[in-house]
Image (cartoon, grey):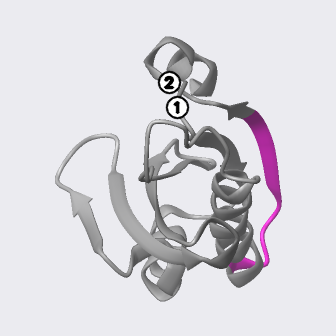
Amino acid sequence: MTLAHGVAIRVHAGFSSVVNALRSCEICSNVYVDVLDSSPRIAVAVGEKYFFRVDNYLAVTIIAVDRGDHVVLKAVATGGRKGLLSFLDYGASRDYALEAVNTICRALNARCEVVAEVSYLDQGKSHQLRI
């Protein structure tokens, strides 16, 4: 069982504005951010944050996809485990994924709709984040 949490949201804002908000969000992009030369336009960001409740760093990966009239944001947060018996993250991955997308939405002052949210995300559940 993985301790990852995924969320997919629809952001009613322009792609460039979303990318600017993503770059400005330290917890969203303090490790990596890039806009790919692709069609549709896609941005990828990686952030990292320390969580006291699990005494560990968690990472969040965010993918932004331009859909013309809106942008799809997908955020997946997860952290490393300390041992074989580390089966709980006390909701830290969920909180991090939601904090990241909520920070972006607040910065944009845009309407954001949660389309999908998946706890204990793994490869077999990843299709649930497709929108």
126 or 93, which is in the foreground?
93
- The residue at 62%/65% (across/down) is 54
Q: Is residue 13 magenta?
A: no
Q: Secondary structure at mark 2?
A: loop
Residue corresponding to mark 1: 2
Q: Position of residue 62 (x, y in %)?
A: 46, 55
Decide if residue 107 is on the left or right side of residue 64.
Answer: right
Label 2 sits on what residue type? Asp
Image quadrant where one finds the C terminus:
top right
Range covered by the magenta-colored residues: 108-116
- The residue at 63%/54% (across/down) is 93
Is 78 rendered above or below residue 108? above
Question: Would you call the spot at circle 2 few (<14 residues within 10 Å), some (14-19), or many (20 or more)?
Answer: some
Is 50 rendered above or below residue 116? below
- The residue at 45%/36% (across/down) is 84
30 or 68, which is in the foreground?
30
In the picture as drawn, the residue positioned furthest to the top comes out as 124
Question: Would you call the spot at circle 1 few (<14 residues within 10 Å), some (14-19), or many (20 or more)?
Answer: some
Decide if residue 113 is on the left or right side of residue 60.
Answer: right
Q: Are marks 2 and 1 in contact (CB under 8 Å)?
A: yes
Residue corresponding to mark 2: 122
Q: Is residue 115 magenta?
A: yes
Q: Position of residue 83 (x, y in %)?
A: 43, 45
Which of the two labelled residues, at mark 2 and mark 1, occupies the earlier sequence position?
A: 1
